[in-house]
Image (tube, helix red, strand yellow):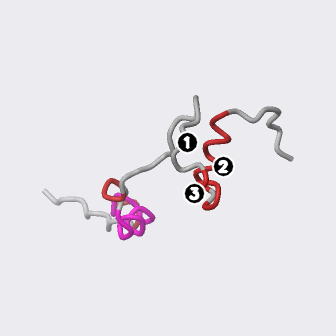
Amino acid sequence: DNKKNRIIPRHVLLAVRNDEELGKLLAGVTIAHGGVLPNINPVLLPKKNEKAAAKEPKSPSKATKSPKKSPKKA
């Protein structure tokens, strides 16, 4: 199913760091050309309540039609 033909150092690093037992065994090991694990500080992530607001339409005019104004009389 997986079409990868080669195991590169990046794949090894991701597998080792995401596995608890291998992570303990190879805790002090540097894997050449492995890179770093992706890590985003939770402070920088959007808050949970903003997701609910994102589902609602941004402009209220699109959600509900405004009543048509009557033509002005001269």
Disc 1 and disc 3: Cα gap in Å? 10 Å
From the viewer's perspective, tell me whether residue 46 is left or right of residue 27: left
Of circles 3 and 2, the one toward us is 3
Q: Which residue is mark 2?
A: 15
Against 31, is 49 above or below?
A: below
Q: Which residue is mark 1?
A: 29
Q: Residues within 10 Å of mark 2 (few under 14, many from 20)?
A: few
- Magenta span contains residue 52: yes
Disc 3 and disc 2: Cα gap in Å? 12 Å
From the viewer's perspective, tell me whether residue 68 is left or right of residue 16: left
Q: Identify which amino acid the numbered label 2 is placed on.
A: Ala
Residue 73 % position (x, y): 16, 60
Q: Quadrant of the C terminus?
A: bottom left
Q: Residues within 10 Å of mark 1 (few under 14, many from 20)?
A: few
Disc 1 and disc 2: Cα gap in Å? 13 Å
Element on which disc 2 rests: helix
Q: Identify which amino acid the numbered label 3 is placed on.
A: Lys
Instruction: Name the residue at 70% across, 33% down.
Output: 8
Element on which disc 3 rests: helix
Point out which mark residue 24 bears. Answer: 3
Residue 52 % position (x, y): 41, 69
The rendered magenta stretch, by its main secondary structure, is classed as helix
Against 53, is 10 above or below?
A: above
| The residue stretch that appears in magenta | 47-60
Of circles 1 and 2, the one toward us is 1
Q: Identify which amino acid the numbered label 1 is placed on.
A: Val
Residue 49 quadrant: bottom left
Q: Residues within 10 Å of mark 3 (few under 14, many from 20)?
A: few
Instruction: Name the residue at 67% across, 40% down.
Output: 11
